[in-house]
Amino acid sequence: MTSARRPSFVPASLRMVLVGAMLVVLAVGSTFAVSATTPRTYYVSCRGNDAASGRGTTSAWRTLAKASAASLKPGDSLRLERGCSFTGPLRTGTSTPWAGTASAPITIDAWGSGPRPKVRDAGENFVVTGRYLVFSDLWTSSPPTSYDTRCDDAPRGNTYGWRLRPGSHHVTIQRSRAVGLHFAVWIEAGSHHHRVLHNDFVGINVKDPNPASDAGAVAVAIHGDDNEVAWNHIEGSDSCSLLYGRDGAAIDIYGGQRNVIHHNVAVDNNAFLELGRNQHTGRIARDTTVAYNDVRSRLTIANFLVVRGDQDRYGPTPGTDVRHNSVYLSGAESYALQCAKGCTPAILVFRDNIVWARDRVGFVDGTWTEARNVWWSPTRPNLWFTIASSSFHADPRYVDGSGGDLHLRSTSPAVDAGGTPPTLPGGARDLDLRAVPRGAAPDIGAYER
């Protein structure tokens, strides 16, 4: 018969030692767990040292190459010193893409005092992979690589501010400035759910160096899906073109789908928005919402919107919904709206907009959904299409169109004549952030009286 084993005797003093050791282990483990989830901040300075830790303003790194090699985790920050100029590119991870989360994004922004930190002089100044990243308060530019002596010495070069690569998603670019460049922001096919907010994109006038293409000069080029472009100031996207005479756009969407373009101010661009089929992927631009934008240009040749029917080689662009925009194009060859080669109601819905163009308010070669718009050209009083009974062929009576003030006078036919605004992020607000409506009904255009 086997006897039961008696428990070993442990003296009280030894028990106290063991308990103390266990508490130390638990405490150390807890410390490691906390430190592993505590966000870290890294600093970069033009007076820094890449041999330093990067973890403080006095131990900052010096180059973006060093910063790009860092392994950033959710909640971490990379901060560039204001007043400094850095040679690009900054890559969001040279080995493993930086990956934040919805609740803990990775931020790339500025520290110190003075002007925004500059990231410049690379073909691609920000090469963006990964997810849930936020870029704030930055400045970017690169010189052109050549000039086209056959076309007004127009600058040429494949130069980009932010290039959002396939697979990247949920990236925000905000409160930043881009100057020059071929594209300020390029959202590539396969990249999605980005936000481009409250930026200044100025003089994006560099065209493609390939003479067979000769296109470009686009502030925000969208080839991906489900993006928001809002509250930006975009000015001077225009270049000489051997193929088209002039070319450039504040925004173009080629193959991107379900994109929302709202509450932007666009000044002196060759076009505000152009949509089409991406010739590389074969995807069409679909289901685009365009609302509450202020679009004005003094350029000789300027457009507001270019969409395409199903007979166009770059078409069709179905589901384009354009509402509550204010347009003033004073150039001698202005051409506000084009929907050609098979325009249908499935291609274009155009409601509650004001279109003032010195030359042509627009051309539509088929049927479409048009309602509650104000159309006017001081030099071509006859419309080239039939408008709905709810629309007006009349001077919209801007406060000062030639001076850039597209608010409405009290006598404007657009006052209280609009319909329900579209559903947008942030709710129903006009371009002055005022709730819509303020009167008996929403006003036509981007501004409420």
Image (cartoon, rainbow, N blue to C red):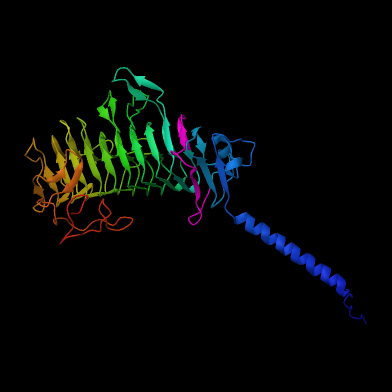
The x and y percentages for residue 50 are 61, 35
Tell me where residue 240 sits by quadrant: top left
> Is 227 on the left-hand or right-hand side of 132?
left
Question: In the shown orientation, is residue 445 left or right of residue 232?
Answer: left
Residue at the image point whose x is 59% and y is 55% from the top: 38
Q: Indicate whether residue 395 is drawn in magenta.
A: no
Q: Is residue 298 left or right of residue 57?
A: left
Between residues 227 and 345, which one lies in front from this camera angle?
227
The residue located at (36%, 20%) in the rendering is 147
Toward the left, the furthest residue is: 382
* Horizontal relation, residue 108 to residue 432: left or right: right
Asked whether residue 368 appears in the rendered view, the answer is: no
Q: Position of residue 131 (x, y in %)?
A: 49, 48
Residue 296 at x, y percent in the picture? 22, 39
The answer to which quarter of the image holds residue 383 is top left
> At 48% from the left edge and 38% from the top edge, which residue is drawn?
127
- Give, as a single range, the part of the protein colored magenta: 99-126
